[in-house]
Image: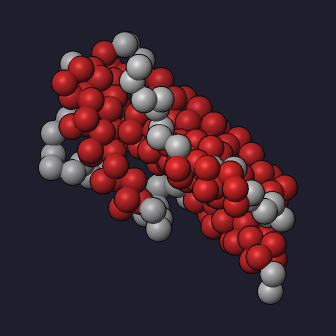
């Protein structure tokens, strides 16, 4: 099998697996443990910026982390890898949708107890009664990102990264040296 065929096969697997995640985001999936660890770390990272930001920080880092990988791979001119990371963003959006929709019911088990992030967030802005709609919005956004990721993966499966670009990126510092 060629590299292109392997990429197409992997994209097909992501499409099928993503469809299962899309239809049943409430189930624990392959990356759920990683996403949970990233989410919990987000609370610690954003806590110094205030209570509201601390509660939002879990969701923020859960979405920022895979977006950082998308940006990294785009910068390295590996659009196919970026499409895979974009798929991860979609999967996280579905997880966030489940969590947001649970704000009033608070049936999901919380790590270490404490207050439900989305009950606090939506309650603080007077939107608690709209938790299901907010959850659906995240789910819908995840579906759009999922479709974009799969289409991008199919479109870029045959891409070959420019080796000189990769070497140059690795040799360049991320920020210009101070003057």
Give how far across and how far down residue 67 sits, in percent: 53, 42
Name the quadrant of the N terminus.
bottom right
Res 30 visible: yes
Give how far across and how far down residue 35 sits, in percent: 39, 53
132 or 150: which is nearer to us? Answer: 150
Q: Residue at x 29, y 23 (%)?
A: 53
Q: Is residue 97 above or below residue 158?
A: above
Q: Is residue 122 left or right of residue 72?
A: left
Q: Residue at x 58, y 59 (%)?
A: 21
Q: Residue at x 74, y 46 (%)?
A: 148
Q: Is residue 26 left or right of residue 116?
A: right
Q: Is residue 147 left or right of residue 82?
A: right
Q: Is residue 83 above or below residue 47?
A: below
All told, the count of numbered labels is 0
Q: Is residue 8 above or below residue 134?
A: below
Res 147 visible: no
- Looking at the picture, the colour scheme in use is secondary structure
Give how far across and how far down residue 3 sits, in percent: 77, 76
Give the quarter of the image for residue 44.
top left
Q: Is residue 16 above or below residue 102?
A: below
Q: Residue furthest front?
A: 179
Name the quadrant of the C terminus.
top left
Q: Residue furthest top?
A: 126
111 or 136: which is nearer to us? Answer: 111
Give the quarter of the image for residue 6.
bottom right
Q: Is residue 10 left or right of residue 46?
A: right
Q: Residue at x 37, y 13 (%)?
A: 125
Give how far across and how far down residue 56 sits, in percent: 34, 29
């Amino acid at each position: 099998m060629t590299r292109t065929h392997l990429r197409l096969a992997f994209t097909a697997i992501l499409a099928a697996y993503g469809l299962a995640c899309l239809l049943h985001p409430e189930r624990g999936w392959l990356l759920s443990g990683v996403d949970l660890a990233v989410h919990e770390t987000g609370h610690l990272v954003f806590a110094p910026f205030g209570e509201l930001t601390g509660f939002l920080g879990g969701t923020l880092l859960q979405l920022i982390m895979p977006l950082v990988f998308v940006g990294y791979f785009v910068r390295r001119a590996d659009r196919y890898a970026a499409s895979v990371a974009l798929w991860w963003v979609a999967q996280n959006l579905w997880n966030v949708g489940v969590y947001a929709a649970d704000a009033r019911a608070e049936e999901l088990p919380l790590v270490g107890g404490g207050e439900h992030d989305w009950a606090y967030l939506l309650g603080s802005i007077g939107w608690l009664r709209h938790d299901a709609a907010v959850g659906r919005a995240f789910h819908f956004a995840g579906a759009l990102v999922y479709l974009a990721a799969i289409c991008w993966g199919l479109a870029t499966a045959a891409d070959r990264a420019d080796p000189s670009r990769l070497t140059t990126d690795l040799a360049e510092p991320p920020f210009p040296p101070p003057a």
